């Protein structure tokens, strides 16, 4: 089976086949031999054969959580999903799909790097404390746009790139849900 | 004392429940609507609802909490930290209701709760304070009048809320031009955070360390100071890493600082647990900053280096016992301890709060590790409260030993489903300046200003890709849909029925 895995800045192709009790995992043209044991629905113990090693022996304890950042969280299917992978003390966001899926997705809609209007949304439920810009204002990347209070902390949401404020959808003092559009920058 | 009501939630409520259990005292928890399933409710002997989820409607409701204590038949109330812990009206309401308040007197809370009154108490006790205004700035003071006062103190200076704490209502002012804007912002923030917009001015001590001294005072006039805590590692004026003892404090300086702290507490007739905070400048001069009239978040590091259970002593003091600890032992730690405050915040995304359900949890264990937590697997981190979910404490014979254990413990610690500051602490523990003890209160802001935390290296990205593919490939599948635990129970039931 072949997967496309988006991790960090790169898309990786990962092929995987079972050979006896072991898995052969092909990543970017190199084969990793893995002895995998499922500990629970969300934890896998892997012994991975290191470069030049004679047997799968490097122990990697990997645990998975549904991604909280992704708009597709909760849409995990048998062959794909958005996860946080926890291993060796690191938390690594991963999107995995059957081979070819990402290409199809790209054609359907602009990705986060697109040039269309930027919708600034509330990352969590909270209250709008301050709106720092007016419609029509020119803004630069990383400029503060709106301040939302949640969990006793004020959080400033910033522009992802240069642009102009097209619309402000909220007022100061207003309560907002996670995902609510606060303003639009184009 | 047979039963104590704990007027708090989260890890500190759990901590107090444990101290009560250790002493054979029954516990009554209180909870808001969203905290019905919280760990402190599950662990307590009994639990009483006090209102809806927003703190103002529950954990800050003096009437509801006193009423719960009376209905529970509690003898005493432990306030924890935060919420009503430094509220003199709450302490007085407990006293009026015939309940023992496990903390200082309402009078001591009032006195030390006013930063300007506390400064004067310190001056009277002969303890140096940061040069600044002795009275709050008048609400009516014009920008020009404030500028004149500021000129006398000298720039750069700090604007601080009289009722302040936790960095709220606090502004650094570098020059006269910044003063009017900073004044407005500080007043408005102080008003909304504390219901009191009064602010005052202090000179800004350059490159200070934040050093504090834990105290216990009994009801018989004995005040004992403990070895200092180093709390300079702060983000947005909130402590995030603490350790004890401090590399910057020699035995001779420790004598002077702890004696000064005890002098302030003695001068105001302080009882129960409290902490005097100092700024320590580069020349080794120290200045009284404020007194916290409650248990501190970071109290466990003092417990680990001195072997004293501070919460149990709070209870013993409240029931009239005498402090019979060896004062010398409290100042000569045999161990070094470090604490990291684990927050439900995303360090890769501007430390945005990250509430939600904890899908998986692996807590570090083994020698030299303590996890004071309010979290559990399957539990929710609500949006209504402080995002700190646990405190990880490690200790060892030396600072290096304690740091190495912290690295080990952080690697074991896994909180899945929400983002936490664990990766941020791994980064701090690898920082050369931190390792060498070269830091002041500006450490984190300076380091974060240089760009994002260490990105994940490509070798670990490879492993994550392999792991994700293995996860997909080996996931139990029923009818093309990944099986959940529930559906497999159902499948097992159906198989059983067909037999």
Image: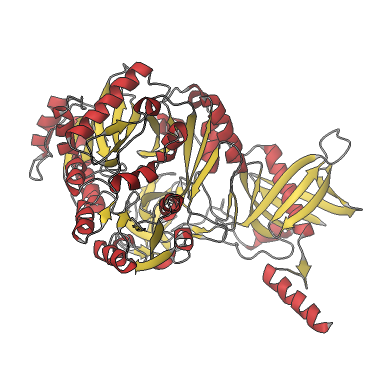
Q: B259 left or right of B444?
A: left
Q: B252 left or right of A58?
A: left
- Residue A150 quadrant: bottom left
- Asked if residue A166 shows in the view, the reply is yes
The residue nearer to you, when weighing A59 against B220, is B220
Q: Which quadrant is home to the N terminus of chain A? A: bottom right
The residue nearer to you, when weighing B385 against B99, is B99
Residue A116 in percent (x, y) is at 51, 56
The residue nearer to you, when weighing A15 against A168, is A15
Residue B33 in percent (x, y) is at 40, 68
- As drawn, the residue found furthest toward the bottom would be B498
Q: Is residue B365 above or below residue B73?
A: above
In percent of the image, x 52 and y 39: which residue is there?
A: B424
Render colour scheme:
secondary structure
Q: Is residue B159 above or below residue A181?
A: above
In percent of the image, x 79 and y 79: which residue is there?
A: B496
- Asked if residue B174 shows in the view, the reply is no
Q: Which quadrant is home to the C terminus of chain A? A: bottom left
In percent of the image, x 16 and y 26: which residue is there?
A: B153
In percent of the image, x 17 and y 42: which residue is there?
A: B111
Residue B474 in percent (x, y) is at 79, 58
Residue A32 in percent (x, y) is at 83, 43
């Amino acid at each position: 089976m072949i997967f496309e895995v988006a991790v960090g800045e790169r898309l990786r192709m990962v092929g995987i086949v079972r050979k006896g009790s072991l898995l052969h995992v092909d990543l970017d043209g190199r084969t990793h031999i893995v002895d995998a044991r499922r500990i629970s629905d969300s934890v896998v113990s892997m012994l991975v054969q290191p470069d030049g090693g004679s047997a799968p022996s490097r122990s990697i304890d990997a645990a998975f959580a549904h991604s909280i950042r992704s708009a597709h969280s909760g849409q995990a299917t048998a062959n794909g999903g958005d996860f946080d992978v926890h291993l060796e003390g690191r938390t690594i966001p991963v999107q995995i799909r059957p081979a070819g899926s990402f290409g199809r997705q790209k054609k359907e809609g602009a990705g986060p790097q697109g040039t269309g209007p930027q919708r600034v949304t509330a990352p969590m439920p909270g209250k709008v404390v301050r709106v720092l810009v007016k419609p029509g204002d020119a803004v630069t990347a990383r400029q503060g746009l709106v301040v939302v209070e949640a969990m006793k902390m004020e959080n400033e949401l910033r522009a992802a790139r240069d642009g102009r404020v097209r619309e402000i959808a909220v007022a100061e003092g207003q309560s907002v849900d996670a995902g609510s559009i606060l303003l639009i920058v184009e | 004392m047979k039963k104590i009501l704990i007027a708090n939630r989260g890890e500190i409520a759990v901590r107090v429940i444990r101290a009560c259990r250790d002493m054979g005292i029954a516990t009554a928890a209180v909870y808001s609507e969203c905290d019905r399933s919280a760990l402190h409710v599950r662990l307590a002997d009994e639990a009483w609802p006090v209102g809806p989820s927003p703190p103002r409607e529950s954990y800050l409701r003096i009437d509801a909490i006193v009423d719960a204590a009376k209905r529970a038949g509690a003898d005493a109330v432990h306030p924890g930290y935060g919420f009503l812990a430094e509220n003199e009206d709450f302490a007085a309401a407990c006293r009026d209701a015939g309940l023992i308040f496990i903390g200082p007197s309402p009078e001591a809370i009032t006195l030390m709760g006013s930063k300007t009154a506390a400064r004067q108490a310190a001056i009277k006790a002969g303890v140096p304070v940061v040069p600044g205004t002795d009275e709050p700035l008048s609400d009516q003071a014009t920008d020009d009048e404030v500028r004149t006062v500021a000129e006398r103190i000298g720039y750069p200076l700090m604007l601080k809320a009289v009722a302040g704490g936790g960095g709220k209502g606090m502004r650094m002012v570098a020059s006269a031009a910044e003063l009017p804007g900073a004044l407005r912002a500080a007043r408005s923030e102080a008003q909304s955070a504390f219901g009191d917009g009064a602010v005052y001015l202090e000179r800004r001590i350059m490159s200070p360390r934040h050093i504090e001294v834990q105290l216990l005072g009994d009801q018989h006039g004995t005040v004992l100071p403990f070895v200092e805590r180093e709390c300079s590692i702060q983000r947005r004026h909130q402590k995030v890493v603490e350790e004890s003892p401090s590399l910057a404090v020699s035995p001779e300086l420790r004598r002077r600082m702890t004696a000064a702290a005890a002098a302030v507490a003695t001068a105001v007739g302080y009882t129960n647990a409290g902490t005097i905070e100092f700024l320590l400048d580069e020349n080794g001069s120290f200045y009284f900053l404020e007194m916290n009239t409650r248990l501190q978040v970071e109290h466990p590091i003092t417990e680990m280096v001195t072997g004293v259970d501070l919460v149990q002593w709070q209870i013993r003091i409240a029931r009239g016992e005498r402090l019979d600890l060896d004062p010398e032992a409290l100042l000569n730690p045999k161990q070094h301890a470090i604490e990291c405050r684990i927050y439900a915040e995303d360090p890769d995304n501007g430390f945005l709060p990250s509430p939600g359900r904890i899908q998986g949890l692996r807590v570090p264990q083994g020698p030299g590790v303590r996890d004071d937590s309010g979290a559990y697997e399957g539990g929710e981190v609500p949006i209504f409260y402080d995002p700190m979910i646990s405190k990880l404490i490690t200790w060892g014979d030396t600072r290096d030993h304690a740091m190495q254990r912290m690295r080990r413990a952080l690697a074991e610690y896994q909180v899945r489903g929400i983002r936490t500051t664990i990766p941020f602490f791994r980064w701090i523990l690898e920082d050369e300046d931190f390792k060498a003890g070269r830091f002041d209160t500006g450490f984190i802001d300076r380091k974060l200003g240089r760009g994002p935390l260490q990105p994940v290296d490509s070798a670990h990205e490879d492993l994550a890709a392999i792991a994700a593919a293995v996860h997909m490939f080996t996931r139990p599948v029923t009818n093309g849909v990944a099986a959940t635990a529930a559906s497999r129970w159902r499948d097992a039931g159906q198989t059983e029925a067909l037999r």
